[in-house]
Amino acid sequence: MSRKRSWELFNTAKYQHPECKWNCGHLAEGHPCEIGPNAKGECCVQKICSPYFDGNTWHCIRPNAFGGKCHEGPIPASPCPDKNATCPHIPTSCQPVRSLRSKRRLLTGLTIAISLGFCLIILGGSGRGSIHNVLNTSSVISPGPLSSSHAAIESGCQACHTAASQSPENLLGFALGGNHGIQESQKCIDCHDDFGKHALMAHSLPRETTIALTTYLKSKSVEPQHTIRQSLARMLTSHETTDAGELACATCHQEHHGNSHDLTKLTNAQCQSCHQQTFHSFASGHPEIKPPSRAGIHFDHVTHLKHHFQNYERLMPNGIPQNNCSDCHTLSSNRATLDLASYKQMCGSCHDSQIRDFNMPSPMRLDHFEFLKSIPEINEMPSKIATTQLSPLSKILGFEVPLFLEMMLAADESSVQVLQSLSQGTNEQETDQLNQVRTIIVANWNRLIQELNTTKSAAVLRRLQIICPPNTNPQQIQDCVEALNSSLFFQAIARYQTIRNSENPVTDEEVIGNWAIVKSRSALIYRASEHEDRLLKTWLDLLASQAAEHEKNTSSYSQNLFMRMFQERVTPGATGRCMKCHTFDKTSDGSFAINWESSHEMKSKREFTFFSHGPHLTFISSQTQSSEQNPSRIQDCQSCHPLNPADPQFVNPAFSQTDGMPHSDNNYHSTLGLISPSKQNCANCHQKQLAGDNCLQCHNYHIHP
């Protein structure tokens, strides 16, 4: 039986050299070399045998500890056999590996070093000469540089992070206490304080509003179909919220990504991670674009471009037609919206004469704004209450009383009491009782005229303050009184009284400013002479704010007065023809707001959707290809806003109802004679490879007043 060699008897156990830092790389194969790595982790297998050349022959000089000299001897290496030789019994070289003990020792040392370093940084104190001052703590623990928007913050980490201002003892507990995004978001609101009182709620809207919107959209849409990517995102991501539904700012706005990082940039996947209805892209799956709301000013483009401007020389010889879009619309300074030219530039050449000339031919005759009227003697009044469709006061007196006078008389408590008592009774009143009521009203009437001649503005102010509700804006009342004063109203009253009491023959009509004293009607009426008439505007605003549709049994006498006077003044044929073009909307409290500008008075500052005209108009002006070469390119404004081929609308459809209230069907108003852009119009360019289809190109996230 042959004797086994020493390396064949070598112990291959894992802990054959527990005191060594390194093990042979062949240990995992079960046949490590006997010499093993050195202390530096280098393989020493070549040191087992270094053949010797005596000038003629190579000789093996392997030590006895590794088996002694071999019989075969070294093998000369080609092509230089006298220069080099190899021993056939030397194992192949290996890559030594650390022993388990060495790994444990290294890991223990690193753990101790990191722990000590962390303690030195965090607990080093803030006194002079401490390590906290030697090391810049914020630069060590900061995850990255700030964006350019926040780079100028000088107060350090504590400006945005609550933990930075805590004591060292609480800092570790704060770091291990979970996500503090909601608490940190309060720091954001300290600077960004323009998002309203619901800043941290979804879309900065009250929770009940978003719930109502979600419920509405669920009822209008089919079961949502999510892509695989969207489904995985919903499963793997979650947003930290409070019980009230508040979201942390960092859910969407991630800091510490460098100076050029855009904090407001969001991906479509981020936007759709919460939405009930999702889609693949704008071109594929996005809902159809909702038509715009009714415009603040009614203007039918088809009627003007295709009819009025084609025949202006016959209809309005002094008119200046506006045939190009740019004649009326110019890009605003923010390059997002379009500014309208002034009324004088756009409309004045044709419509000024319609405002001034109350006798011009018209399908709707101008309704004079009557303020005063002479009251006949009681014995000249009818013996019974009139049965015509007049106000209670007019029925009692037997003639139509101007609503302004009735409003002023309503400030006298005695007048209101007798009017309410009669309006609730029958028309069969005793003559004596009726004359008693008339006596009270006539006395109040004469006292009112006397006050208007003596105390003037103070009389109107006092009476308006009585009949208007307590929550009425006092400045609105004051503006109405000042408008009367500046229009020469009180001078006209004095002259009206002089003419009424004079027995000398005078002309049937005398004019003072915009006031006309009409002898045949025994009336003082107001006529507008120009656009933006101050008296009409202030009084219409007051009437709109006080007018509201109440139940008959719940509204007061003064409330009914405001509503009746508002309905009378907003007809298209009323003095000044204001409401021939200007529209009005209902407010949340049931009153009305008149749209003196093209944008709505009630419109919030921000909405979910916005559109910027700037890039589109730049695209139009810089294009060089024709529509035949590239039909998807925008050629002019009518590429997106073509004229409606329907018949021209010569009468504002809002006033097809005779009560002067807005028409329930606002579709025509929303288009202004133009066909609203469709999603396909936009999708021709707004694709990922072209103009882009990111949600934030058209949508706001934060919606707030």
Image (cartoon, rainbow, N blue to C red):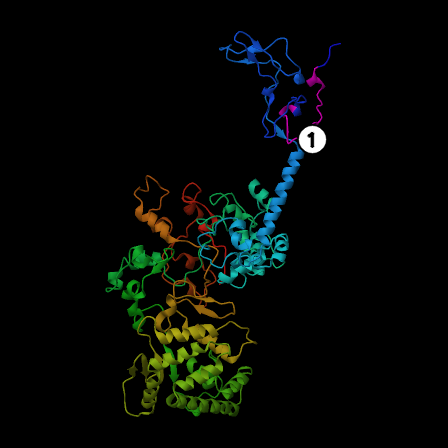
Q: Quadrant of the N terminus?
A: top right
Q: Is residue 80 magenta?
A: no
Quarter holding residue 209: bottom right
How many numbered tags mark residues here? 1
480 or 77, nearer to the observer? 77
- The range drawn in magenta is 5-26
504 or 249, nearer to the observer? 249
Residue farthest to the top, as pictured: 56
Q: Residue at x 36, y 55 (%)?
A: 335
Can you give x and y, in whole percent of width and height, for residue 394 in the image?
45, 82
Can you give x and y, in whole percent of width and height, for residue 148 in the image?
44, 53
Q: Is residue 47 above or below residue 433?
A: above
Question: At numbered mark 1, what does the secondary structure look like: helix, strand or loop?
Answer: loop
22 or 60, nearer to the observer? 60
**What amino acid type should be assigned to the residue bearing mark 1?**
Pro
Q: Is residue 236 left or right of residue 332?
A: right
Mark 1: few/some/many CA within 10 Å (<14, 14-19, 20+): few
Q: Is residue 679 above or below residue 39?
A: below
- Prevailing secondary structure class for the magenta stretch in the rendered image: loop
Q: Residue at x 59, y 49 (%)?
A: 118
Q: Residue at x 34, y 80 (%)?
A: 486
| Residue that badge 1 annotates | 18
Q: Is residue 310 above or below residue 268?
A: below
Can residue 97 be seen in the rendering of this structure? yes
Residue farthest to the right, as pictured: 1
Can you give x and y, in whole percent of width and height, for residue 134 in the image?
52, 53
Can residue 246 be seen in the rendering of this structure? no
Quarter holding residue 97: top right
